[in-house]
Amino acid sequence: MLFQNKFIYYISLIISIVFIIVVFYMIFTSFKIVDRQFLDIDDKTYVNQVKIDEFTHSLAKKLTLHCKNDKICEVQSMLDFTTNIPYKVNESIARSARKVVSQNFGDCDDKSNLLISLLHVKGYEAYFVLVPKHIFVIVHLDVNQSLNKKALYVNGKAFYKLETTATNSKIGFPLKYSFEQIEAIIDPFENKKLVVNSLTYK
């Protein structure tokens, strides 16, 4: 009987410890998810839904298969796909790439999440740019002469604007915002604001 009581006691103790570990793990994971998705900028909270998964890998590969490693072709193909998804205001938080594609609509947040996820899969350095009531993507391409478009130079490196809300828009979409209107340049995979020491548009 004493042996039975001790056995039950130790089993209960082990179950309790495992339960506590699981609870702490879930809390820690929740904080990591929040930290990866939510970023406070001034008096606003920015939310991203970037994701690298089997879906984005498969889609990026399919969209760029014909490009034969031509960087301009790859970026333009992914941009074309994104811009041809119908624009519709999403009243909720930004959605994942899979949802934007399956539901076939999105606003600037949604479509930017989709595009930057595809770009990231293909190894491009790309960032979100937040301006009043809008978000767009910039991508680094070392092809200034062949594009013949103005670039936004961030800390001396050339980035080209990708406008996801303009159907069939091209790489290097004109920058219609002043530098003062740029609220933040964000790496959504790190969920951090980029430290900008210099900014030019030429």
Image (spheres, rainbow, N blue to C red):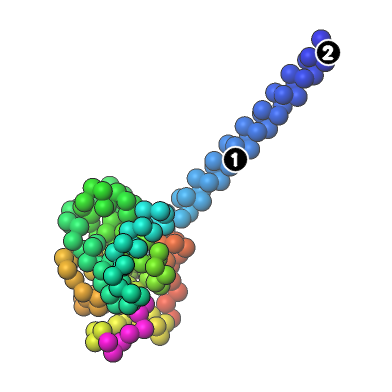
Within 10 angstroms of label 2, few (less than 14), some, or many (20 or more) residues?
few
Pinpoint residue 61: horizontal percent, then vertical percent: 35, 63
Q: Identify which residue is drawn at 30% across, 73% down.
A: 67
Name the image quarter holding residue 73: bottom left
Residue 124 appears left or right of 166: right
Circle 2: residue type: Leu
Residue 17, relative to residue 9: is it above or below? Answer: below
Q: Identify which residue is drawn at 35% across, 80% down.
A: 141
Q: Is mark 1 on a helix, strand or loop?
A: helix
Label 1 to label 2: alpha-carbon separation:
33 Å
Nearest-to-viewer mark from 1 and 2: 2
* Magenta highlight range: 140-146
Residue 159 appears left or right of 172: right
Q: Is mark 2 on a helix, strand or loop?
A: helix
Pinpoint residue 95: horizontal percent, then vertical percent: 31, 51
Pinpoint residue 150: horizontal percent, then vertical percent: 26, 84
Q: Residue 24 carries which label?
A: 1
On-image quarter of the N terminus = top right
Q: Name the residue under label 2.
A: 2
Residue 46, relative to residue 7: is it above or below? Answer: below
Circle 1: residue type: Phe
Does residue 30 appear in this view?
Answer: yes
Name the residue nearer the viewer: 105 or 201: 105
Residue 138 appears left or right of 192: left
Q: How many marks?
A: 2
Q: Identify which residue is drawn at 18% across, 71% down.
A: 169
Residue 11 appears left or right of 154: right
Residue 95, relative to residue 123: is it above or below? Answer: above
In reply to whether residue 63 is colored magenta, the answer given is: no
Within 10 angstroms of label 1, few (less than 14), some, or many (20 or more) residues?
few
Residue 122, relative to residue 142: is it above or below? Answer: above
